[in-house]
Image: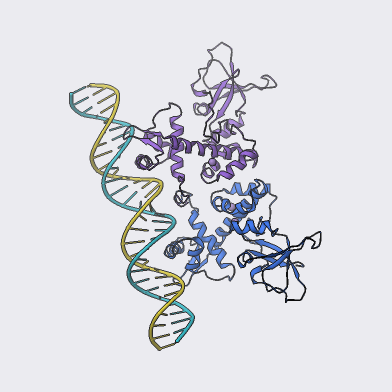
Chain colours: A purple, B blue, C cyan, D yellow
DNA sequence: TCCCTGATTTAGGTATACCTAATATTTAGG
DNA sequence: CCTAAATATTAGGTATACCTAAATCAGGGA
Protein backbone atom coordinates (compact mmCIF):
# COMPACT_ATOMS: atom_id res chain seq x y z
CA UNK A 1 0.00 0.00 0.00
CA UNK A 2 2.20 2.75 -1.27
CA UNK A 3 1.46 6.13 0.24
CA UNK A 4 -0.73 8.53 -1.68
CA UNK A 5 -0.53 7.55 -5.31
CA UNK A 6 -4.10 8.64 -5.79
CA UNK A 7 -3.59 12.05 -7.38
CA UNK A 8 -5.26 14.91 -5.52
CA UNK A 9 -7.06 12.58 -3.16
CA UNK A 10 -6.35 11.78 0.43
CA UNK A 11 -4.41 8.76 1.64
CA UNK A 12 -5.85 5.85 3.59
CA UNK A 13 -4.24 7.23 6.70
CA UNK A 14 -5.72 10.69 6.26
CA UNK A 15 -9.12 9.15 5.57
CA UNK A 16 -8.90 7.27 8.85
CA UNK A 17 -8.03 10.38 10.82
CA UNK A 18 -10.96 12.26 9.30
CA UNK A 19 -13.37 9.42 10.04
CA UNK A 20 -12.13 9.18 13.61
CA UNK A 21 -12.51 12.92 14.16
CA UNK A 22 -16.06 12.74 12.82
CA UNK A 23 -16.97 9.79 15.02
CA UNK A 24 -15.45 11.23 18.19
CA UNK A 25 -16.97 14.68 17.69
CA UNK A 26 -20.45 13.28 17.07
CA UNK A 27 -21.56 12.80 20.71
CA UNK A 28 -20.73 16.33 21.92
CA UNK A 29 -20.29 18.13 18.63
CA UNK A 30 -17.13 19.89 19.78
CA UNK A 31 -13.38 19.68 19.35
CA UNK A 32 -11.64 16.31 19.51
CA UNK A 33 -8.50 15.93 21.62
CA UNK A 34 -5.32 14.18 20.47
CA UNK A 35 -5.45 11.54 23.15
CA UNK A 36 -8.87 10.31 22.10
CA UNK A 37 -7.75 10.16 18.49
CA UNK A 38 -4.56 8.32 19.41
CA UNK A 39 -6.54 5.71 21.32
CA UNK A 40 -9.13 5.26 18.58
CA UNK A 41 -6.56 4.98 15.82
CA UNK A 42 -4.12 2.84 17.78
CA UNK A 43 -1.19 5.21 17.23
CA UNK A 44 1.02 7.24 19.55
CA UNK A 45 -0.19 10.71 20.59
CA UNK A 46 2.86 12.24 18.94
CA UNK A 47 1.79 10.73 15.63
CA UNK A 48 -1.59 12.41 15.98
CA UNK A 49 -0.06 15.83 16.63
CA UNK A 50 2.11 15.40 13.56
CA UNK A 51 -0.74 14.46 11.32
CA UNK A 52 -3.06 17.20 12.59
CA UNK A 53 -0.40 19.82 11.99
CA UNK A 54 0.08 18.58 8.47
CA UNK A 55 -3.64 18.45 7.72
CA UNK A 56 -4.22 21.92 9.14
CA UNK A 57 -1.27 23.44 7.26
CA UNK A 58 -2.28 22.05 3.87
CA UNK A 59 -3.33 24.46 1.08
CA UNK A 60 -6.97 23.36 1.41
CA UNK A 61 -7.02 22.31 5.09
CA UNK A 62 -9.13 19.34 6.07
CA UNK A 63 -9.13 20.26 9.76
CA UNK A 64 -9.04 23.30 11.96
CA UNK A 65 -6.44 22.75 14.63
CA UNK A 66 -5.14 24.77 17.55
CA UNK A 67 -2.30 23.62 19.77
CA UNK A 68 -3.58 22.09 22.99
CA UNK A 69 -7.22 22.83 22.03
CA UNK A 70 -8.05 19.83 19.91
CA UNK A 71 -9.26 19.64 16.33
CA UNK A 72 -12.40 20.19 14.26
CA UNK A 73 -13.21 19.04 10.73
CA UNK A 74 -13.25 21.79 8.11
CA UNK A 75 -16.19 21.67 5.69
CA UNK A 76 -13.95 19.87 3.18
CA UNK A 77 -12.76 17.45 5.86
CA UNK A 78 -16.31 16.70 6.91
CA UNK A 79 -17.31 16.11 3.32
CA UNK A 80 -14.49 13.64 2.85
CA UNK A 81 -15.20 11.87 6.15
CA UNK A 82 -18.86 11.41 5.22
CA UNK A 83 -17.85 10.15 1.80
CA UNK A 84 -15.74 7.43 3.42
CA UNK A 85 -18.51 6.55 5.88
CA UNK A 86 -20.86 6.27 2.92
CA UNK A 87 -18.43 3.90 1.23
CA UNK A 88 -18.07 1.89 4.43
CA UNK A 89 -21.77 1.42 5.00
CA UNK A 90 -22.64 0.74 1.38
CA UNK A 91 -19.89 -1.87 1.25
CA UNK A 92 -21.15 -3.49 4.45
CA UNK A 93 -24.67 -3.61 3.05
CA UNK A 94 -23.39 -5.06 -0.20
CA UNK A 95 -21.30 -7.74 1.49
CA UNK A 96 -24.29 -8.68 3.62
CA UNK A 97 -27.00 -8.63 0.97
CA UNK A 98 -25.14 -9.77 -2.13
CA UNK A 99 -22.19 -11.80 -0.85
CA UNK A 100 -23.85 -13.32 2.23
CA UNK A 101 -21.17 -12.25 4.67
CA UNK A 102 -21.93 -12.95 8.33
CA UNK A 103 -22.85 -9.78 10.25
CA UNK A 104 -19.72 -9.76 12.37
CA UNK A 105 -17.32 -9.91 9.43
CA UNK A 106 -18.69 -6.94 7.55
CA UNK A 107 -16.75 -4.29 9.36
CA UNK A 108 -13.22 -5.52 8.84
CA UNK A 109 -13.58 -5.95 5.10
CA UNK A 110 -15.38 -2.61 4.70
CA UNK A 111 -12.77 -0.86 6.80
CA UNK A 112 -10.15 -1.76 4.19
CA UNK A 113 -12.11 -1.46 0.96
CA UNK A 114 -13.76 1.88 1.78
CA UNK A 115 -10.54 3.67 0.78
CA UNK A 116 -10.04 1.99 -2.56
CA UNK A 117 -13.35 1.77 -4.41
CA UNK A 118 -14.08 4.23 -7.20
CA UNK A 119 -17.07 6.51 -7.44
CA UNK A 120 -18.36 4.17 -10.13
CA UNK A 121 -18.15 1.20 -7.79
CA UNK A 122 -19.98 3.18 -5.13
CA UNK A 123 -22.70 4.16 -7.59
CA UNK A 124 -23.11 0.63 -8.91
CA UNK A 125 -23.50 -1.07 -5.55
CA UNK A 126 -25.84 1.68 -4.36
CA UNK A 127 -28.02 1.10 -7.41
CA UNK A 128 -27.87 -2.68 -7.06
CA UNK A 129 -29.03 -2.37 -3.45
CA UNK A 130 -31.84 0.06 -4.29
CA UNK A 131 -30.15 3.05 -2.65
CA UNK A 132 -30.41 1.85 0.94
CA UNK A 133 -30.59 4.40 3.76
CA UNK A 134 -29.40 2.09 6.53
CA UNK A 135 -26.65 -0.50 6.82
CA UNK A 136 -26.97 -3.98 8.38
CA UNK A 137 -25.94 -2.65 11.80
CA UNK A 138 -28.71 -0.05 11.70
CA UNK A 139 -26.48 2.94 10.93
CA UNK A 140 -27.56 5.70 8.58
CA UNK A 141 -25.79 5.80 5.24
CA UNK A 142 -24.72 9.36 4.37
CA UNK A 143 -26.27 10.57 1.14
CA UNK A 144 -24.40 11.26 -2.07
CA UNK A 145 -24.75 14.94 -1.22
CA UNK A 146 -22.94 14.44 2.08
CA UNK A 147 -25.89 14.61 4.44
CA UNK A 148 -25.94 12.20 7.35
CA UNK A 149 -29.57 11.41 8.28
CA UNK A 150 -29.93 11.83 12.05
CA UNK A 151 -30.99 8.92 14.26
CA UNK A 152 -32.46 9.63 17.66
CA UNK A 153 -31.63 6.69 19.82
CA UNK A 154 -30.37 5.96 23.29
CA UNK A 155 -27.41 3.92 24.39
CA UNK A 156 -28.85 0.96 26.30
CA UNK A 157 -26.07 1.29 28.86
CA UNK A 158 -27.37 4.76 29.75
CA UNK A 159 -31.07 3.93 30.05
CA UNK A 160 -32.36 3.44 33.61
CA UNK A 161 -34.53 0.35 33.93
CA UNK A 162 -38.15 0.69 35.18
CA UNK A 163 -38.31 0.63 39.03
CA UNK A 164 -38.57 -2.82 40.63
CA UNK A 165 -42.17 -4.02 40.78
CA UNK A 166 -43.39 -1.78 37.94
CA UNK A 167 -44.14 -2.91 34.39
CA UNK A 168 -41.38 -3.64 31.91
CA UNK A 169 -41.15 -1.38 28.87
CA UNK A 170 -40.47 -2.18 25.25
CA UNK A 171 -37.93 -0.62 22.90
CA UNK A 172 -36.77 -1.30 19.37
CA UNK A 173 -33.12 -2.06 18.71
CA UNK A 174 -32.09 0.88 16.54
CA UNK A 175 -28.51 -0.15 15.85
CA UNK A 176 -25.63 -2.21 17.14
CA UNK A 177 -21.97 -1.28 17.11
CA UNK A 178 -20.03 -2.79 14.23
CA UNK A 179 -16.55 -2.69 15.73
CA UNK A 180 -16.41 -5.67 18.09
CA UNK A 181 -16.92 -8.91 16.18
CA UNK A 182 -17.11 -11.06 19.32
CA UNK A 183 -19.76 -8.92 20.97
CA UNK A 184 -21.71 -8.79 17.71
CA UNK A 185 -21.74 -12.55 17.34
CA UNK A 186 -22.93 -12.79 20.91
CA UNK A 187 -25.73 -10.27 20.40
CA UNK A 188 -26.85 -11.92 17.20
CA UNK A 189 -26.96 -15.33 18.90
CA UNK A 190 -29.39 -13.78 21.40
CA UNK A 191 -31.53 -12.30 18.62
CA UNK A 192 -30.47 -8.74 19.37
CA UNK A 193 -30.19 -7.21 15.90
CA UNK A 194 -31.54 -3.96 14.46
CA UNK A 195 -35.33 -3.97 14.40
CA UNK A 196 -35.72 -6.52 17.21
CA UNK A 197 -38.14 -5.62 20.03
CA UNK A 198 -36.43 -5.48 23.39
CA UNK A 199 -38.21 -5.53 26.75
CA UNK A 200 -36.34 -3.84 29.62
CA UNK A 201 -37.06 -5.86 32.74
CA UNK A 202 -37.68 -3.84 35.91
CA UNK A 203 -35.23 -3.38 38.71
CA UNK A 204 -31.95 -4.72 37.47
CA UNK A 205 -29.76 -2.96 34.92
CA UNK A 206 -28.89 -4.77 31.65
CA UNK A 207 -31.62 -7.39 32.13
CA UNK A 208 -33.78 -7.63 29.03
CA UNK A 209 -35.83 -10.06 27.02
CA UNK A 210 -36.93 -10.25 23.41
CA UNK A 211 -40.49 -9.17 22.72
CA UNK A 212 -41.32 -11.13 19.59
CA UNK A 213 -43.10 -8.92 17.04
CA UNK A 214 -45.69 -11.53 15.97
CA UNK A 215 -46.05 -13.92 18.89
CA UNK A 216 -46.21 -11.28 21.61
CA UNK A 217 -43.67 -12.40 24.17
CA UNK A 218 -44.00 -16.16 24.23
CA UNK A 219 -40.72 -17.98 24.82
CA UNK A 220 -38.97 -14.81 25.93
CA UNK A 221 -36.06 -15.92 28.07
CA UNK A 222 -34.52 -13.14 30.14
CA UNK A 223 -31.11 -12.12 28.79
CA UNK A 224 -28.56 -10.79 31.22
CA UNK A 225 -26.28 -8.43 29.31
CA UNK A 226 -22.89 -7.30 30.45
CA UNK A 227 -22.18 -3.59 30.74
CA UNK A 228 -19.92 -4.00 27.72
CA UNK A 229 -22.77 -5.49 25.66
CA UNK A 230 -25.02 -2.64 26.74
CA UNK A 231 -22.44 -0.18 25.37
CA UNK A 232 -22.91 -1.68 21.93
CA UNK A 233 -26.69 -1.36 21.64
CA UNK A 234 -28.73 1.72 20.74
CA UNK A 235 -32.49 1.61 21.27
CA UNK A 236 -35.55 3.80 20.73
CA UNK A 237 -38.99 3.69 22.31
CA UNK A 238 -41.38 1.35 20.48
CA UNK A 239 -43.82 4.15 19.63
CA UNK A 240 -41.40 6.59 17.92
CA UNK B 1 -2.29 3.73 1.41
CA UNK B 2 0.13 3.27 4.22
CA UNK B 3 2.93 0.85 3.46
CA UNK B 4 2.69 -2.72 4.62
CA UNK B 5 0.34 -2.79 7.54
CA UNK B 6 -0.87 -6.21 6.49
CA UNK B 7 1.08 -8.44 8.85
CA UNK B 8 3.21 -11.05 7.13
CA UNK B 9 1.77 -10.26 3.73
CA UNK B 10 3.28 -8.38 0.84
CA UNK B 11 2.63 -4.73 0.08
CA UNK B 12 0.78 -3.41 -2.95
CA UNK B 13 4.09 -2.42 -4.46
CA UNK B 14 5.65 -5.85 -3.98
CA UNK B 15 2.53 -7.46 -5.45
CA UNK B 16 2.89 -5.30 -8.53
CA UNK B 17 6.53 -6.23 -9.01
CA UNK B 18 5.70 -9.92 -8.74
CA UNK B 19 2.82 -9.64 -11.20
CA UNK B 20 5.02 -7.74 -13.65
CA UNK B 21 7.80 -10.33 -13.41
CA UNK B 22 5.27 -13.08 -14.07
CA UNK B 23 3.78 -11.30 -17.06
CA UNK B 24 7.11 -10.39 -18.62
CA UNK B 25 8.60 -13.84 -18.15
CA UNK B 26 5.60 -15.58 -19.67
CA UNK B 27 6.48 -15.22 -23.37
CA UNK B 28 10.03 -16.60 -23.14
CA UNK B 29 9.92 -18.25 -19.73
CA UNK B 30 13.31 -16.86 -18.73
CA UNK B 31 14.79 -14.09 -16.61
CA UNK B 32 13.28 -10.62 -16.66
CA UNK B 33 15.57 -7.61 -16.98
CA UNK B 34 15.29 -4.46 -14.87
CA UNK B 35 14.63 -2.19 -17.80
CA UNK B 36 11.56 -4.12 -18.89
CA UNK B 37 10.26 -4.06 -15.35
CA UNK B 38 10.91 -0.36 -15.00
CA UNK B 39 8.99 0.36 -18.17
CA UNK B 40 6.08 -1.87 -17.29
CA UNK B 41 5.77 -0.48 -13.77
CA UNK B 42 6.39 3.13 -14.71
CA UNK B 43 9.25 3.59 -12.26
CA UNK B 44 12.94 4.43 -12.65
CA UNK B 45 15.35 1.55 -13.29
CA UNK B 46 17.14 2.37 -10.05
CA UNK B 47 13.92 1.78 -8.15
CA UNK B 48 13.66 -1.67 -9.70
CA UNK B 49 17.18 -2.63 -8.70
CA UNK B 50 16.45 -1.51 -5.16
CA UNK B 51 13.27 -3.48 -4.90
CA UNK B 52 14.74 -6.64 -6.44
CA UNK B 53 17.65 -6.58 -4.02
CA UNK B 54 15.26 -6.26 -1.12
CA UNK B 55 12.98 -9.04 -2.34
CA UNK B 56 15.89 -11.38 -3.00
CA UNK B 57 17.51 -10.68 0.38
CA UNK B 58 14.35 -11.31 2.41
CA UNK B 59 14.22 -14.29 4.80
CA UNK B 60 11.79 -16.11 2.48
CA UNK B 61 12.80 -14.62 -0.87
CA UNK B 62 10.11 -13.96 -3.45
CA UNK B 63 12.58 -13.70 -6.32
CA UNK B 64 15.91 -15.06 -7.38
CA UNK B 65 18.08 -12.20 -8.51
CA UNK B 66 21.59 -11.87 -9.85
CA UNK B 67 23.23 -8.54 -10.61
CA UNK B 68 23.06 -7.69 -14.28
CA UNK B 69 21.38 -11.04 -15.09
CA UNK B 70 17.75 -10.23 -14.40
CA UNK B 71 15.28 -11.82 -12.05
CA UNK B 72 13.13 -14.95 -11.71
CA UNK B 73 10.19 -15.63 -9.42
CA UNK B 74 10.85 -18.06 -6.59
CA UNK B 75 8.15 -20.68 -6.03
CA UNK B 76 6.73 -18.48 -3.25
CA UNK B 77 6.86 -15.41 -5.50
CA UNK B 78 5.10 -17.24 -8.31
CA UNK B 79 2.41 -18.42 -5.92
CA UNK B 80 1.80 -14.89 -4.72
CA UNK B 81 1.78 -13.47 -8.26
CA UNK B 82 -0.79 -16.04 -9.39
CA UNK B 83 -2.87 -15.30 -6.33
CA UNK B 84 -3.01 -11.63 -7.31
CA UNK B 85 -3.78 -12.45 -10.93
CA UNK B 86 -6.60 -14.67 -9.69
CA UNK B 87 -7.95 -11.77 -7.64
CA UNK B 88 -7.64 -9.44 -10.63
CA UNK B 89 -9.51 -11.67 -13.02
CA UNK B 90 -12.20 -12.72 -10.58
CA UNK B 91 -12.80 -9.06 -9.74
CA UNK B 92 -13.01 -8.16 -13.43
CA UNK B 93 -15.51 -10.94 -14.00
CA UNK B 94 -17.52 -9.85 -11.00
CA UNK B 95 -17.60 -6.19 -12.03
CA UNK B 96 -18.70 -7.23 -15.51
CA UNK B 97 -21.29 -9.85 -14.60
CA UNK B 98 -22.73 -8.50 -11.36
CA UNK B 99 -22.10 -4.75 -11.47
CA UNK B 100 -22.51 -4.20 -15.22
CA UNK B 101 -19.22 -2.40 -15.71
CA UNK B 102 -18.30 -1.64 -19.30
CA UNK B 103 -15.53 -3.91 -20.61
CA UNK B 104 -12.93 -1.17 -20.85
CA UNK B 105 -13.32 -0.02 -17.24
CA UNK B 106 -12.76 -3.40 -15.62
CA UNK B 107 -9.01 -3.29 -15.56
CA UNK B 108 -8.43 -0.06 -13.69
CA UNK B 109 -10.77 -0.95 -10.83
CA UNK B 110 -9.44 -4.51 -10.59
CA UNK B 111 -5.86 -3.27 -10.63
CA UNK B 112 -6.51 -1.41 -7.38
CA UNK B 113 -8.84 -3.79 -5.57
CA UNK B 114 -6.85 -6.96 -6.27
CA UNK B 115 -4.47 -6.04 -3.44
CA UNK B 116 -7.07 -5.37 -0.79
CA UNK B 117 -9.75 -8.03 -0.92
CA UNK B 118 -9.70 -10.85 1.63
CA UNK B 119 -9.66 -14.55 0.92
CA UNK B 120 -13.28 -14.59 1.98
CA UNK B 121 -14.17 -11.94 -0.59
CA UNK B 122 -12.35 -13.92 -3.25
CA UNK B 123 -14.17 -17.11 -2.28
CA UNK B 124 -17.57 -15.41 -2.24
CA UNK B 125 -17.34 -13.79 -5.63
CA UNK B 126 -15.91 -17.00 -7.13
CA UNK B 127 -18.91 -18.91 -5.75
CA UNK B 128 -21.37 -16.24 -6.88
CA UNK B 129 -19.96 -16.44 -10.41
CA UNK B 130 -20.00 -20.24 -10.49
CA UNK B 131 -16.20 -20.58 -10.33
CA UNK B 132 -15.43 -19.15 -13.75
CA UNK B 133 -12.30 -20.28 -15.61
CA UNK B 134 -12.02 -17.27 -17.88
CA UNK B 135 -12.40 -13.51 -17.38
CA UNK B 136 -14.29 -11.12 -19.68
CA UNK B 137 -11.15 -10.43 -21.74
CA UNK B 138 -10.70 -14.15 -22.39
CA UNK B 139 -7.82 -14.67 -19.94
CA UNK B 140 -7.50 -17.82 -17.85
CA UNK B 141 -8.21 -17.39 -14.15
CA UNK B 142 -5.55 -19.14 -12.05
CA UNK B 143 -7.02 -21.80 -9.80
CA UNK B 144 -7.18 -21.66 -6.03
CA UNK B 145 -4.27 -24.11 -6.04
CA UNK B 146 -2.13 -21.69 -8.03
CA UNK B 147 -2.31 -23.38 -11.41
CA UNK B 148 -2.64 -21.17 -14.47
CA UNK B 149 -4.50 -23.04 -17.20
CA UNK B 150 -2.55 -22.67 -20.43
CA UNK B 151 -4.06 -21.03 -23.48
CA UNK B 152 -2.62 -21.75 -26.87
CA UNK B 153 -3.26 -18.72 -28.97
CA UNK B 154 -1.45 -16.52 -31.44
CA UNK B 155 -0.94 -12.79 -31.41
CA UNK B 156 -2.83 -11.46 -34.41
CA UNK B 157 0.03 -9.07 -35.13
CA UNK B 158 2.32 -12.05 -35.69
CA UNK B 159 0.07 -14.10 -37.95
CA UNK B 160 0.83 -13.88 -41.66
CA UNK B 161 -2.32 -13.35 -43.73
CA UNK B 162 -3.20 -15.88 -46.47
CA UNK B 163 -1.44 -15.06 -49.79
CA UNK B 164 -3.29 -12.64 -52.11
CA UNK B 165 -5.82 -14.43 -54.28
CA UNK B 166 -6.18 -17.43 -51.96
CA UNK B 167 -9.13 -18.08 -49.64
CA UNK B 168 -9.50 -16.19 -46.37
CA UNK B 169 -9.27 -18.23 -43.19
CA UNK B 170 -11.29 -18.03 -40.01
CA UNK B 171 -10.09 -17.77 -36.42
CA UNK B 172 -11.76 -17.33 -33.06
CA UNK B 173 -10.84 -14.36 -30.89
CA UNK B 174 -9.29 -16.03 -27.87
CA UNK B 175 -8.61 -12.94 -25.78
CA UNK B 176 -8.05 -9.22 -25.94
CA UNK B 177 -5.62 -7.21 -23.86
CA UNK B 178 -7.18 -5.48 -20.87
CA UNK B 179 -4.66 -2.70 -20.41
CA UNK B 180 -5.57 -0.10 -23.04
CA UNK B 181 -9.09 1.18 -22.46
CA UNK B 182 -9.18 3.21 -25.69
CA UNK B 183 -8.12 0.28 -27.86
CA UNK B 184 -10.59 -1.99 -26.05
CA UNK B 185 -13.49 0.37 -26.66
CA UNK B 186 -12.49 0.51 -30.29
CA UNK B 187 -12.30 -3.27 -30.63
CA UNK B 188 -15.61 -3.76 -28.90
CA UNK B 189 -17.28 -1.23 -31.21
CA UNK B 190 -16.11 -3.41 -34.11
CA UNK B 191 -17.46 -6.56 -32.48
CA UNK B 192 -14.01 -7.94 -31.74
CA UNK B 193 -14.50 -9.55 -28.33
CA UNK B 194 -13.53 -12.98 -27.01
CA UNK B 195 -15.41 -15.72 -28.82
CA UNK B 196 -16.05 -13.68 -31.96
CA UNK B 197 -15.19 -15.35 -35.30
CA UNK B 198 -12.61 -13.41 -37.21
CA UNK B 199 -11.85 -13.87 -40.91
CA UNK B 200 -8.33 -12.95 -42.01
CA UNK B 201 -8.60 -11.42 -45.48
CA UNK B 202 -5.89 -12.45 -47.95
CA UNK B 203 -2.98 -10.30 -48.99
CA UNK B 204 -2.95 -7.35 -46.64
CA UNK B 205 -1.86 -7.51 -43.02
CA UNK B 206 -4.33 -6.51 -40.29
CA UNK B 207 -7.33 -6.63 -42.64
CA UNK B 208 -10.08 -8.78 -41.16
CA UNK B 209 -13.84 -9.15 -41.08
CA UNK B 210 -16.29 -10.66 -38.66
CA UNK B 211 -17.58 -14.10 -39.60
CA UNK B 212 -20.94 -14.18 -37.86
CA UNK B 213 -21.43 -17.52 -36.12
CA UNK B 214 -25.07 -18.03 -37.18
CA UNK B 215 -25.51 -16.03 -40.38
CA UNK B 216 -22.33 -17.21 -42.09
CA UNK B 217 -20.67 -14.02 -43.23
CA UNK B 218 -23.52 -11.82 -44.31
CA UNK B 219 -22.98 -8.11 -43.60
CA UNK B 220 -19.29 -8.62 -42.90
CA UNK B 221 -17.62 -5.25 -43.49
CA UNK B 222 -13.86 -5.46 -43.78
CA UNK B 223 -12.14 -3.97 -40.74
CA UNK B 224 -8.74 -2.42 -41.20
CA UNK B 225 -6.86 -2.76 -37.93
CA UNK B 226 -3.81 -0.79 -36.93
CA UNK B 227 -0.64 -2.61 -35.94
CA UNK B 228 -1.34 -1.45 -32.39
CA UNK B 229 -4.82 -3.02 -32.43
CA UNK B 230 -3.34 -6.26 -33.75
CA UNK B 231 -0.98 -6.31 -30.77
CA UNK B 232 -3.99 -6.49 -28.47
CA UNK B 233 -5.74 -9.49 -30.02
CA UNK B 234 -4.98 -13.19 -29.52
CA UNK B 235 -6.62 -15.69 -31.83
CA UNK B 236 -6.81 -19.45 -32.36
CA UNK B 237 -7.80 -21.49 -35.40
CA UNK B 238 -11.54 -22.12 -35.60
CA UNK B 239 -11.13 -25.92 -35.47
CA UNK B 240 -9.03 -26.19 -32.27
C1' DT C 1 -1.54 31.74 43.63
C1' DC C 2 1.44 27.74 42.71
C1' DC C 3 2.49 23.28 41.59
C1' DC C 4 1.48 18.70 40.04
C1' DT C 5 -0.11 15.69 36.86
C1' DG C 6 -1.75 14.33 32.70
C1' DA C 7 -2.07 15.81 27.99
C1' DT C 8 0.38 17.57 24.32
C1' DT C 9 4.06 18.86 21.51
C1' DT C 10 8.93 18.75 19.92
C1' DA C 11 13.05 16.31 18.65
C1' DG C 12 15.18 12.75 16.60
C1' DG C 13 14.71 8.08 14.24
C1' DT C 14 12.85 4.02 11.40
C1' DA C 15 10.82 1.73 7.25
C1' DT C 16 8.77 1.79 2.59
C1' DA C 17 9.11 3.27 -1.87
C1' DC C 18 10.00 6.37 -4.83
C1' DC C 19 13.44 9.93 -7.44
C1' DT C 20 17.93 11.92 -10.04
C1' DA C 21 22.70 11.89 -11.05
C1' DA C 22 26.88 9.55 -11.10
C1' DT C 23 29.27 5.26 -11.82
C1' DA C 24 29.96 0.64 -13.42
C1' DT C 25 29.09 -3.39 -16.23
C1' DT C 26 27.77 -5.93 -20.31
C1' DT C 27 27.52 -6.67 -24.97
C1' DA C 28 27.48 -5.91 -29.81
C1' DG C 29 29.82 -3.59 -33.82
C1' DG C 30 33.80 -2.43 -36.09
C1' DC D 1 39.94 -7.37 -29.41
C1' DC D 2 38.33 -2.97 -28.16
C1' DT D 3 35.18 0.51 -27.43
C1' DA D 4 30.70 2.88 -27.18
C1' DA D 5 25.95 2.49 -26.38
C1' DA D 6 22.69 0.29 -23.68
C1' DT D 7 21.75 -1.43 -19.34
C1' DA D 8 22.26 -1.75 -14.54
C1' DT D 9 23.81 -0.36 -10.06
C1' DT D 10 25.26 2.80 -6.40
C1' DA D 11 24.93 7.07 -3.89
C1' DG D 12 22.36 10.45 -2.00
C1' DG D 13 17.58 12.55 -1.38
C1' DT D 14 12.36 13.14 -0.82
C1' DA D 15 7.73 12.15 1.12
C1' DT D 16 4.51 9.53 4.08
C1' DA D 17 3.57 7.78 8.37
C1' DC D 18 4.83 5.71 12.02
C1' DC D 19 7.80 5.33 16.70
C1' DT D 20 10.16 6.65 21.57
C1' DA D 21 11.94 9.88 24.74
C1' DA D 22 12.35 14.43 26.21
C1' DA D 23 10.39 18.85 26.77
C1' DT D 24 6.38 21.85 27.59
C1' DC D 25 1.77 23.31 28.60
C1' DA D 26 -2.85 23.74 30.99
C1' DG D 27 -6.08 23.29 34.54
C1' DG D 28 -7.58 21.80 39.18
C1' DG D 29 -6.65 21.31 44.03
C1' DA D 30 -3.98 22.84 48.13
MN1 LIG E 1 -18.45 -0.91 9.99
MN1 LIG F 1 -17.70 8.02 -3.09
MN1 LIG G 1 -6.88 -6.51 -15.98
MN1 LIG H 1 -6.73 -15.02 -2.71
Residue sitting at the far right: B215
Q: Residue at x 49, y 29 (%)?
A: A228
Question: As displayed, is residue B148 above or below residue A158?
Answer: below
Frontmost residue, B192 versus A200: B192
Question: As displayed, is residue B226 above or below residue B122?
Answer: below
| Coordinates of residue B115 in the picture (x, y in percent) | 54, 52
Quarter of the image holding residue A136? top right
| Coordinates of residue D19 in the picture (x, y in percent) | 36, 45
Number of labels in the image equals 0
| Coordinates of residue B232 in the picture (x, y in percent) | 62, 63
Q: Residue at x 51, y 63 (%)?
A: B40
Residue B105 visible here: yes
The quarter of the picture where the C terminus of chain A appears is top right
Residue sitting at the far top: A165
Frontmost residue, B187 versus A81: B187
| Coordinates of residue C16 in the picture (x, y in percent) | 43, 55
User: Quarter for ligand 3?
Assistant: bottom right
Quarter of the image holding residue B194? bottom right
Q: Is residue A204 left or right of residue B202?
A: left
Residue B155 visible here: no
Quarter of the image holding residue A192? top right
Q: Is residue A121 left or right of residue A53?
A: right
Frontmost residue, A137 versus B135: B135
Q: Is residue B17 left or right of residue B50?
A: right
Amino acid sequence: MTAGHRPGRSTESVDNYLKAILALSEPHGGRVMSKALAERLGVAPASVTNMLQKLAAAPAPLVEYERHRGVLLSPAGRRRALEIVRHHRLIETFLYEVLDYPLEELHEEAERLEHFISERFEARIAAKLGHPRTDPHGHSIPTLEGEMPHRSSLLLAEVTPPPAGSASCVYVVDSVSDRDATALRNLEANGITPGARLRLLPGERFLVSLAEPATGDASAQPISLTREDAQEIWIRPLSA
